[in-house]
Image (cartoon, rainbow, N blue to C red):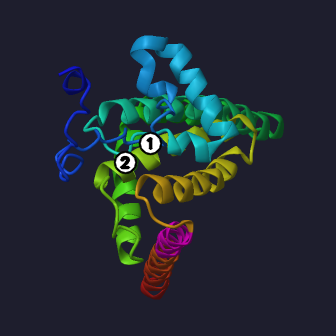
């Protein structure tokens, strides 16, 4: 009877492991042990500390920043707010530099002070409207990038959907900080944003960097063709009107 008390328990059934529940899914960003970007934790960190830390992360390590960015949470407000703030910051520097440059190029050479003042007022109006332009540009840019990535076959394994493209473009607004540099800041911001687009598309849509680069190149090419075509059509129209006016005279 004593030996019966120490008898080993019966072995588990063969399908015991098959019946175990699956592990919970990991977070939609970089990895199971990496926290999301500070901007996603602004309720805990505070608004401005989260903004500053997010900017620092995207400036110093854009790949890691996008790896820690949730690809899709249903929250459009957070990324849009970030994009608007960075657009306003860049717009302020652009407005100051353009106003100073315009004044320096106008008044010393006998220019009209009223013209310089009017130009400054127009720039200030543009600065006020920057948030609206930023939101419109964000969705247009995200839509075009999303379409370009689909054309090159980069959305095959993506689960992020359009929100992934919106987040790509929104956090690429960090490039607006390049406008701190006078004169060439705008061009630098545009080029820097293209680098962000490649990282964002590749990581958030889980595609290769080669396809992300192809999508960005396709977008830039189409935009350049459209701009050149518009200029040519506009120039041809002006030339035709001038010729008609000359012939009529």
Q: 247 and 210: which one is in front?
A: 210
Left or right, 6 with reference to 85: left
Q: Is residue 223 magenta?
A: yes
Which residue reaches farthest front?
Answer: 1
Q: Is residue 174 above or below residue 81?
A: below
Left or right, 215 with reference to 5: right
Residue depicted at x 50% and y 78%? 225
How many neighbours does mark 2 have within 10 angstroms: few (below 14), some (14-19), or many (20 or more)?
many
Q: Position of residue 50 (x, y in %)?
A: 52, 20
Q: Are marks 2 and 1 in contact (CB under 8 Å)?
A: yes
Residue depicted at x 50% and y 81%? 239
Left or right, 96 with reference to 207: right
Residue depicted at x 31% and y 48%? 163
SS at badge 2: helix
Q: Position of residue 209 (x, y in %)?
A: 55, 66
Which numbered circle lies on residue 166? Answer: 2
Query: Which residue is under mark 1?
Result: 170
Indicate the quadrant containing the N terminus: top left, top right, bottom left or bottom right.
top left
Q: 238 and 197: which one is in front?
A: 197
Q: Is residue 113 above or below residue 134?
A: above
Residue depicted at x 39% and y 47%? 138
Span highlighted in magenta in the image: 210-224
Which numbered circle lies on residue 46? Answer: none
Q: Position of residue 207 (x, y in %)?
A: 45, 65
Q: Is residue 247 above or below residue 229?
A: below
User: In the picture, residue 183 is in which quadrant?
Assistant: top right
Q: Position of residue 32 (x, y in %)?
A: 45, 37
Is residue 95 visible in the rendered structure shown here? no
Q: 94 and 112: which one is in front?
A: 94
How many neighbours does mark 1 have within 10 angstroms: few (below 14), some (14-19), or many (20 or more)?
many
Is residue 10 visible in the rendered structure shown here? yes
Q: 232 and 108: which one is in front?
A: 232
């Amino acid at each position: 009877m004593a030996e019966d008390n120490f008898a080993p328990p019966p072995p588990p059934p063969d399908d015991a492991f098959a019946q175990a529940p699956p592990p919970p899914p990991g977070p939609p960003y970089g990895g199971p042990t990496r926290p999301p970007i500070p901007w996603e934790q602004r309720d805990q960190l505070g608004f401005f500390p989260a903004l500053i830390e997010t900017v620092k992360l995207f400036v110093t390590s854009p790949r890691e920043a996008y790896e820690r960015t949730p690809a899709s949470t249903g929250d459009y407000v957070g990324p849009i707010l970030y994009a608007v703030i960075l657009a306003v910051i860049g717009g302020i520097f652009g407005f100051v530099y353009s106003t100073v440059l315009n004044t320096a190029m106008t008044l010393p050479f006998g220019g009209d002070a009223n013209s310089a003042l009017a130009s400054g007022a127009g720039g200030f109006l543009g600065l006020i409207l920057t948030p609206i332009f930023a939101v419109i540009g964000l969705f247009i840019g995200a839509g075009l990038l999303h379409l370009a990535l689909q054309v090159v076959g980069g959305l095959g394994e993506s689960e992020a959907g359009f929100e992934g493209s919106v987040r790509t473009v929104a956090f690429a607004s960090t490039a607006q900080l390049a406008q701190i540099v006078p004169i060439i800041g705008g061009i630098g911001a545009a080029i820097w944003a293209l680098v962000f687009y490649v990282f964002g598309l590749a990581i958030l849509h889980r595609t290769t960097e080669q396809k992300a680069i192809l999508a960005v190149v396709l977008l830039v090419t189409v935009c350049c063709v459209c701009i050149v075509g518009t200029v040519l059509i506009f120039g041809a129209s002006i030339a035709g009107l001038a010729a008609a006016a000359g012939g009529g005279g």
